[in-house]
Amino acid sequence: MPLSEIRITLPAWVERFVAWQEPCVSAEARMALAIGLARANVEGGTGGPFGAAVFDLVTHRPVAVGVNLVQSAQNAVLHAEIVALMLAQATLGRYTLNAPGLNPHALVTSCEPCAMCLGALLWSGVRELECGATRADAARIGFDEGPVFAASYAYLAARGVGVRLEVRRAAAAAVLEDYRQSDGTIYNG
Ligand SMILES: [Zn+2]
């Protein structure tokens, strides 16, 4: 029988890892969480070297976080950004983070999003995207980001989504490099 339901569960360590009440006012502070999640995901053996978080840009607190669950869940779409966006929307009970009455939100990701995640963040209603490592950093260790073009970012900008690239890039890229040196699986290479 085909399944009629799937369950998406973050690794148990995540709950202890995140200081939910602690405001992260700067992009660098928000990125530190995303990078920390990426590194802990590798070190915990729970997935690929990518982490993400959705932040409320008024309270500056994280609403939800995600880590890459592709291998652990056997699910190609469970990139860190997708997991964070889905959990943020489930937490708030809204299909868009741009719904009336909600504060603006940012998606903070340890690496520039792939084509799928760029699409998802557009529909998610986040007002800002903050990225750590670059597409080139991911490609250097063999991860393919898919059909992402300069026009993709121009489209986001035209829709009012602010983009900040290379936030704490060196620290974010170091997670990728360490993953390669530990012979981590490149599942979409
Ligand atoms: Zn992705």
Image (spheres, rainbow, N blue to C red):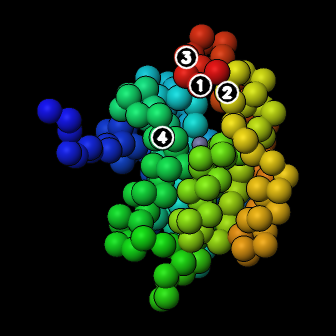
Label 1, label 2: how many angstroms apart (C-alpha)? 6 Å
Name the kind of residue labelled 4 in the image: Val
SS type, badge 4: loop
- Indicate the position of residue 134 as horizontal and vertical percent values: 78, 40
Circle 2 is placed at which residue position? 143
| N-term mark: 1 or 4 | 4
Circle 1 is placed at which residue position? 188
Q: Residues within 10 Å of mark 4 (few under 14, many from 20)?
A: some
- Indicate the position of residue 57 as horizontal and vertical percent values: 60, 73
Q: Residues within 10 Å of mark 1 (few under 14, many from 20)?
A: few
Whether ligand 1 has any atom under 8 Å from the Cβ at mark 2 is answered as no
Q: Residues within 10 Å of mark 3 (few under 14, many from 20)?
A: some
- Quarter in which the N terminus is drawn: top left
Q: As drawn, is 58 to the left or to the right of 19?
A: right
Circle 3 is placed at which residue position? 185
| N-term mark: 4 or 3 | 4
Name the kind of residue labelled 3 in the image: Thr
- Indicate the position of residue 113 as horizontal and vertical percent values: 66, 46
Q: Quadrant for residue 92, please give it.
A: bottom left
Residue nearer the viewer, 142 or 106: 142
Q: As drawn, is 157 to the left or to the right of 106?
A: right
SS type, badge 2: loop
**Residue found 68% across the figure and 60% down from its top:** 129
**Residue found 43% across the figure and 63% down from its top:** 88
Circle 4 is placed at which residue position? 77
**Residue found 53% across the figure and 65% down from its top:** 124
Name the kind of residue labelled 1 in the image: Asn
Q: Answer whether labels 1 and 2 touch (C-beta < 8 Å).
A: yes
Q: Answer whether labels 2 and 3 touch (C-beta < 8 Å).
A: no
Q: Is residue 27 above or below residue 94?
A: above
Residue nearer the viewer, 60 or 143: 143
